Amino acid sequence: MTERPQDSENTNSSRRSFLGGGVAGLVAGLQTSASLAASPPEDKVTTHVSAVAESKVKVVNAVNSRLFSFCGGLTGDWMVTSIRAICGETLPDAERLHIHQGLGNAHEALSSDTKWFLRGVTSNDRYVTRPEKELLVARQAPLGRATATHAALIPIRKSAAWWAMTQDERRALFEEESHHIKIGMDYLPAIARRLHHCRDLESKEPFDFLTFFDFAPGDEPLFDRMLEKLRSTREWSFVDREVDIRLKKVTPT
Ligand code: HEM
């Protein structure tokens, strides 16, 4: 797939996100306003900041269980076996991936070892028809099966031309022309998946989607065959950034 020029706004936002993205912004923002308070001793500032930050985080967390954060660094349940840019700018190397649900763990996620921090929310379906939905529900498996010790995190950004289309134009391209669902359906239940949307977050994110899949090691070639098919569709000609991150479950010793 050919590399296309990045738009400068997105490039800047991806740099920001490597440095912590929206959550870092939230924590930094709280620190700034607290430091404007009438010069209390330094230890009091810290206590005040963390109390305010914690209460804010709890409030957000209470309504945000659909939020997933993917933290590349030195810790986490998944070992990163490869990071490969398919199109556009890659992501920095990381040894492990930690997946957080909700915002409660944001402080932990943003340690000094964090190399990248990506966030997205699960959401309602945008394209599936009722018959497709019923087939998917009948065939798909949940993430986290004991046999699914390999996984892939594939963050994707689509071009401005994709987003300029209307919903019905996108659906026609996505399914009637590119057969995304029809192709994917053939790989169920071997491959389990979860789609996260990034454009619905309050902060600007470097990708539009975070796609996550898990499968048994023996099904990885199957997964690769599916990727080959999807990446050759017209839908994928609208993908202007894609990074393929492969993972292996860390077995407790
Ligand atoms: C395991 C087989 C797969 C199945 C059954 C599947 C199914 C689907 C379905 C049903 C949707 C539409 C959800 C909606 O209505 O909003 C969707 C969207 C999407 N899928 Fe897949 N998919 C599969 C594999 C993949 C793979 C391997 C990738 C990435 C490499 C991928 C990337 C995406 C993206 C980015 C979207 C959002 C498209 C958009 O809203 O523009 N899918 N998929």
Image (tube, rainbow, N blue to C red):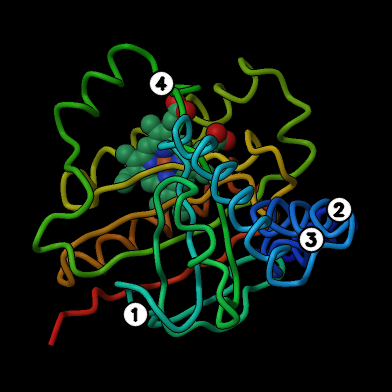
* Amino acid type at mark 3: Arg
The answer to whether residue 39 is left or right of residue 46 is right
Q: Which residue is mark 3?
A: 4
Q: Quadrant of the N terminus?
A: bottom right
Q: Which mark is residue 37?
A: 2
Which residue shows up at 33% across the image and 55% down it? 213
- Of badges 1 and 2, the one in the foreground is 2
Q: In the image, which is nearer the foreground, mark 4 or mark 3?
A: 4
Q: Residue shown at 68%/57% (left/top)?
A: 49
Query: CB of mark 2 within 8 Å of CB of mark 4?
Result: no
Instruction: Point out the tag, 3 or 2, that comes first from the N-terminus.
Output: 3
**Residue 20 placed where, x, y %?**
67, 64
Residue under pointer 4? 128
Q: What is the CA distance from the residue labelled 1 to the residue labelled 3?
A: 30 Å
Q: Amino acid at mark 4?
A: Val
Mark 4 against mark 1, which lies toward the viewer?
1
Q: Residue at x 13, y 55 (%)?
A: 145
- Front residue of 217/63: it is 63
Which of the two discs, 4 and 1, labels the residue nearer the N terminus? Answer: 1
- Indicate left or right for 15 with 38 as reference: left
- Mark 1, mark 3: which one is toward the viewer? 1
Q: Quadrant of the C terminus?
A: bottom left
Q: Amino acid at mark 1?
A: Met
Q: Is mark 4 within 8 Å of ligand 1?
A: yes
Distance from disc 4 to disc 1, alpha carbons, whole Å, reads 33 Å
**Residue carrying label 1:** 79
Point out the quarter of the image occupied by ligand 1: top left
